Amino acid sequence: MTKLITLFFILIPAFVFAQFSGRTGDSTVYKLGGRPVKGYKALTLSFDPVGIFGSDESFYKKVGLTDGNLFNGKYFFKDNMAARLGVRVFKDGQSSKGSVDVDVSGNNISGREMRDVKTEYILVPGVERHFSNNNIFDVYVAGELYLGFGRTLTVDNTDYNNGFYEHNKRTTPKYMGGFGAVVGVNMFVLDLPISVGVEYGLNAIFNFANKTKVVSEAKDALGERSSTYYTQEKDPFGNADSNQYSSLKSTGSYVNTATNFKINVNFYFR
């Protein structure tokens, strides 16, 4: 038995060595990087690790807009220069308008109209300057502008069958502008037209017209009357503000670096 075990440990290493000694090296050479040149385009998927791991409030909400990601694209008009554009479109709306069957409802309301619509548009144009000629890493800086606008509209109208009515319309315009400065680095994935990278930079954003215009019209036994005033959800100290202003100017600014840290995946094509 001992002789059999000894023979087994002698033959197995010899067999393995024979197998490996008959193999030849793989001569395939993988190119590292598919560096874009003039005429190339790119689509970029961005991920915000700050938002993923938690923050007190998102970047867009800080400037009075709805949270969301941009659709990003690039065009290389030179080997080391690219124009970039981020776009986001948001709309959320519901509405209803109808005549009330008084016999069924049993009240004196003859009609109702209700609308709640929110629209937002954001454009972020910019230019990139690429420095490194290394085929693996691509270092660049970029400057970009932030242009955003939108509106929230709320309509709540009630008509009564005796000719009286209560009509209320609330309009909140939104305007946002600013700039950003970015430094980034990409790493190309083998010979695929794909790169993975990070960006870090500075955002300076200003928002305007952060107020709501209210138009109220009514008709009752005392006659017809109307009023127009302005409100704001919160005052500059962050407290709820229930005042009705005859005139109101409300602006804000937001400058930060943490919210401009992104992980990017770029897909290149002609």
Image: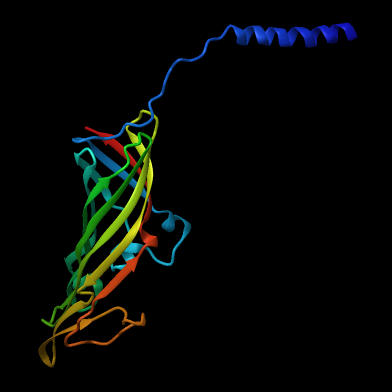
- Residue depicted at x 32% and y 41%: 132
Image color mode: rainbow
- Is residue 171 placed above or below 36 in the rendered structure? below
- Is residue 205 placed above or below 239 in the rendered structure? above
Q: Quadrant of the C terminus?
A: top left
Residue 54 or residue 128, whichever sits in front: 128
Q: Mark yes or no: residue 28 visible.
A: yes
Q: Quadrant of residue 114?
A: bottom left
- Is residue 49 placed above or below 109 in the rendered structure? above
**How far across and down, in percent of the image, does residue 121 sit?**
20, 58
- Residue depicted at x 65% and y 6%: 18
Furthest toward the bottom, the residue is 222
Q: Quadrant of residue 252?
A: bottom left
**How far across and down, in percent of the image, does residue 153 sit?**
19, 69
Q: Quadrant of the N terminus?
A: top right
Total labels drawn: 0
**How far across and down, in percent of the image, does residue 152 sit?**
21, 68
Q: Mark yes or no: residue 1 visible.
A: no
**How far across and down, in percent of the image, does residue 14 sit?**
71, 7
Residue 114 or residue 106, whichever sits in front: 114
- Residue depicted at x 30% and y 85%: 242
